[in-house]
Amino acid sequence: MTVASALSTRATTDPERPYLRTDDRVYAYGEVEAQAEALAAGLAGLGVEAGDRIALVLPACPEFAVSMFAAAKLGAIVVPLNPHLAPLELHYMMRHSQAVAAVTIEQDRDVDFLQLFEEIMPQLPELKHLVTVGEEDLWYDDRIFQFEDLLSAGDGRDFEARAADPDDCFALVYTSGTSGKPKGVELSHANLLSTAAGTAEAIRLGPDDIVVGISGLFHVYGLGPGLLGTLAAGASFVVLNHGDPATILDAAERHGATVHYGIPTLFVGEVAQMRRRPRDLSSLRIAVVAGAPADDTLLASVSEGLGTTVVSGYSVTETASTVSTTVPGDSPEERRFTVGRPLPGTSVRIVESTEDGDVELPVESVGEIRVRGPGVMLGYYRQPRKTADSFDSEGYFRTGDLGILDEDGFLHLVGRNRDVIIRSGFNVYPREVESRVEAHPAVREAAAIGLADPLLGEAICACVVLVEGAIVTGQEIVDWCRDTLADEKVPDFIRFVDDLPRTNTGHVRRVELSRSVLSEM
């Protein structure tokens, strides 16, 4: 199937079944299908066609899903972007993706997106049309259209669209590389649908389930197991713009949620919230922890605090999210100490690179996790050399993560052989933080490290060596970073040091630096 045919099939067989739930109303599968058809016709009327890229700069909202399916019906490619990226990052991704149209919210969390796009559109020559979700009257600009107006314009109209192939690219999902530079991961219809359906099947998602917890649809997990996994199962999905623990717990209670997705940071906050003000979560049958490593203590705490079965998985953007997951039938020990078995059709092997080439290691050995299967990406957009370097000679994707496969086929995460800090479920690469900190005139050099944090998973600490005689506070450096970095990349702590410990080859000894900082805290 393609994403468009998956929705059409569900809407035809069960049009009245609830799909998207908000605080105000419920959208049935048939209604989402009808709106997607109308929006596709409206976009086609603007000249958007198969192969074009449509950026979705939206918080979690029904319009995100409708826009995604409308793009699928046109044979276009969606570019889901975090609406709260720093303007420079948003501009880079919009320009790199060559998006011809963007769908955006008008106002969200005190950000005026109309003003933001007014500033960056002159620098985006490919961007021809902006579709806005909101109430603003924008008659003065012939490039800007209201979402509702396009729906009305396309309602009942035919449009020309090329039938997509399941192996065609459908989504460009941006992720950072080891240097911190964004890469556009090309995911096909088949990549996303196979992983979404496999995840749904693993946790036994069914038509009577109500899913809660995902507030970032731009992320591969929200796009795949979230929206498309719910579609595959014929379940319903609670759409939440705000992802704070109290809001999600209230929504779970109000909607009678049965399945709760979330990152470790969210669940930690929810357990604390439940202690302060318990909610009735008796409808909840399973909690799925994903997006960042979670230790056994956290999983036990979530199970006790929310009163439900907890499973966890291992996901990577380049594999369309889930690689492996524990399932409700696994033993408590397997669910607490592993990230489960690979999804059906997915092959995982543990490899060590030597001077003589790659060597596949036996069970219970630590090595790099490599993955081959239906979810593995088509490649990195406009980066053929990077794409080639990311696969080994047998077509396995090099994840850069370290793990163990045990005798029963369960995968254990051990660590990473690349520098990365996982803060609140987001990958943050030290170099992008360091580059910004070092751009401050008072800073001679800097090193960013991750410190274990019960709420964030890992907090970012920037260790700073000042220019001789310079005077600056840690807060001033944090504010300096906030001007250009996304919120999840801004350092949580600043530590001033006389120098950075280095190896003989000049690399920063991050482990030694972490120990030094922790000893002072």
Image: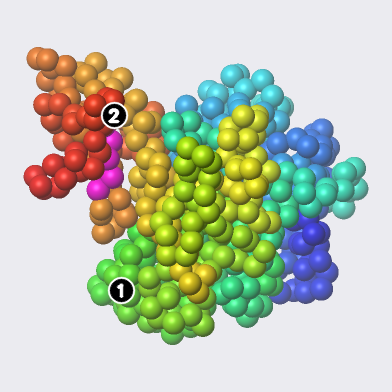
- 344 over 432 or under it: above or below: below
Say which amino acid is labelled 1: Ser
Q: Can residue 8 be spotted in the picture?
A: yes
Q: Where is residue 69 in the image (x, y as percent from the top left)?
A: 73, 52
Q: Is residue 131 above or below residue 329?
A: above
The CA distance from mark 2 to mark 1 is: 38 Å
Looking at the rendered structure, the secondary structure element under dot 2 is loop
Q: Give the structural element (helix, strand or loop) at label 1.
A: helix
- Closer to us: 371 or 218: 371
Residue 56 visible to an observer of this rendering: no
In the picture, the disc for residue 301 is: 1
Name the side, left or right, on which 161 lies relative to 81: right
Determine if the magenta segment contains residue 448.
yes
Disc 2 target residue = 507
Residue range highlighted in magenta: 447-451
- Residue 486's tag is none
